[in-house]
Amino acid sequence: MSKGYVFMMCNKGLTTVYTGVTNNLERRVVEHKLGKGSTFTTNYKLSILIYYEEYGCINEAIAREKQLKNWHRDWEWSLIKSENPELKDLSEDWYEKLDPEINSG
């Protein structure tokens, strides 16, 4: 089985959070940054990776995503801030060699 990732993306104003799951975090984050992610993330301009978890298999990641999607907003933000207190884009240095459009958010 392949690895799985649960991740959270937000917009620049930190007003909307999207929780997703993937087997390739870097590819999926690029898709979101280019506006090629889900309709929801594209409409709300959710291009900042603020949180992620890695799992040994995709089924574990899917189970965790379902759990997180049932959480209250305050719980999500507490989790995010416990790992990323400055709310930095965790992927900001992943794509330096790629198209500058990706880094413009």
Image (spheres, rainbow, N blue to C red):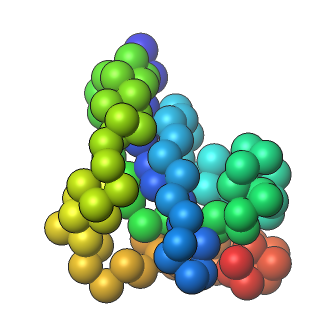
Residue found at the far left of this picture:
82
Whether 75 is drawn above or below 93: the answer is above
Q: Which of 88 and 97 is in front in this view?
A: 88
| Residue shown at the point (36%, 35%) measured from the top left | 70
Looking at this view, is 55 or 81 the one in front? 81
Q: How many marks?
A: 0
Q: What residue lies at 64% left-to-right and 64% top-to-bottom? A: 46
Q: Against 41, is 65 above or below?
A: above
Q: Can the viewer see residue 60?
A: yes
- As rendered, which of 67 and 72 lies closer to the eye? 72
Quadrant of res 65: top left
Using residue 1 as the reference point, say whether residue 27 is left or right of it: right
Q: State the quadrant of the N terminus.
A: top left
Residue positioned 31% across, 31% down in the render = 67
Question: Can residue 33 be seen in the rendering of this structure?
Answer: no
Give the x, y percent position of residue 61: 37, 29
Image quadrant of residue 12?
A: bottom right
Left or right position of 105 against 35: left
Judge left or right: residue 70 versus residue 79: right
Quarter of the image where the C terminus is located = bottom right
Q: In this view, does 88 lie above or below 62?
A: below
Name the spot of residue 30 as percent of width and height, x first.
68, 58
The picture places residue 32, in percent across and down from the top left corner, at 70, 57
- Residue found 54% across the figure and 52% down from its top: 18
User: Depth check: 59 or 66 in front?
Assistant: 66
